[in-house]
Image (cartoon, rainbow, N blue to C red):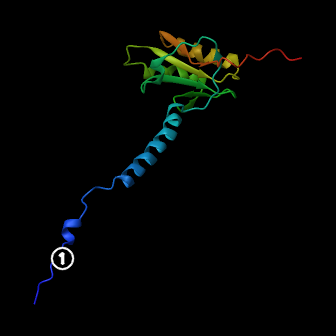
Amino acid sequence: MAIVKRDEGKKVNSNINVTPMVDVMLVLLIIFMVITPMLENKVNVTLAQTENAVAMEDASKEDAITIAITRDGKVFLGQDQTSIADLGSKVSDLLKDKTNKMVFFRSDSRAHYGTVMDAIDAVRTTGVDEVGLLTENRQPNTKPPTGGQ
């Protein structure tokens, strides 16, 4: 009687299938790409467009003090709504331990000019050295609005 020997062990393929891992990584990449812009702008405002905007890299830092003013006159320090009367004391508390005393303003292009100036005045009385007004760079093909006819 003969012994039957099976040679299936020689056919085993030991390659790793990386397709599921690549699929998961691509999904995570898409999720982070969608969520990251939402984290930067805590309060949605339509910034004014200017011809020669200067880049302010300090405004995107995590510890930057940013004040947003919406078109309906609401004032936000970070993402917390506050009043203009309380704005100065809250900013001075945040600037207490900082050497760079700069505050950034993100104002809606349709916000009332008086509200923006009142907020800047409230911040300037607390000893702020510099105020940065954040704007967007105007696209070359867009033209400024002209007077109505």
* Image quarter (top left, top right, bottom left or bottom right) of the C terminus: top right
Answer yes or no: is residue 125 visible: no
- Element marked by disc 1: loop
Q: Residue furthest bottom?
A: 1
Looking at the image, residue 149 sits to the left or right of residue 70; the answer is right
Picture coordinates of residue 52, whole percent (x, y): 60, 11
In which image quadrant can residue 101 be found? top left
Q: Nearer the viewer, residue 14 or 118?
A: 14
- Quick check: 128 above or below 47? above
Q: Residue furthest left?
A: 1
Which residue is located at x 36 percent, y 52 percent?
Answer: 21
Answer yes or no: is residue 131 visible: yes
Looking at the image, residue 1 sits to the left or right of residue 123; the answer is left
Which residue is located at x 39 percent, y 49 percent?
Answer: 22
Looking at the image, residue 90 sits to the left or right of residue 8; the answer is right
Residue holding disc 1: 6
Picture coordinates of residue 19, whole percent (x, y): 38, 53
Q: Residues within 10 Å of mark 1 (few under 14, many from 20)?
A: few
Picture coordinates of residue 10, whole percent (x, y): 19, 66
Q: Nearer the viewer, residue 99 or 11?
A: 11
Q: What amino acid is found at the position of numbered circle 1 in the picture?
A: Arg
Q: Nearer the viewer, residue 22 or 115?
A: 22
* Image quarter (top left, top right, bottom left or bottom right) of the N terminus: bottom left
Q: How many marks?
A: 1
- Quick check: 8 above or below 98? below
Q: Residue furthest right?
A: 149
- Quick check: 105 above or below 25? above
Picture coordinates of residue 126, whole percent (x, y): 49, 14
Q: Residue furthest front?
A: 1
Which residue is located at x 33 percent, y 56 percent?
Answer: 17
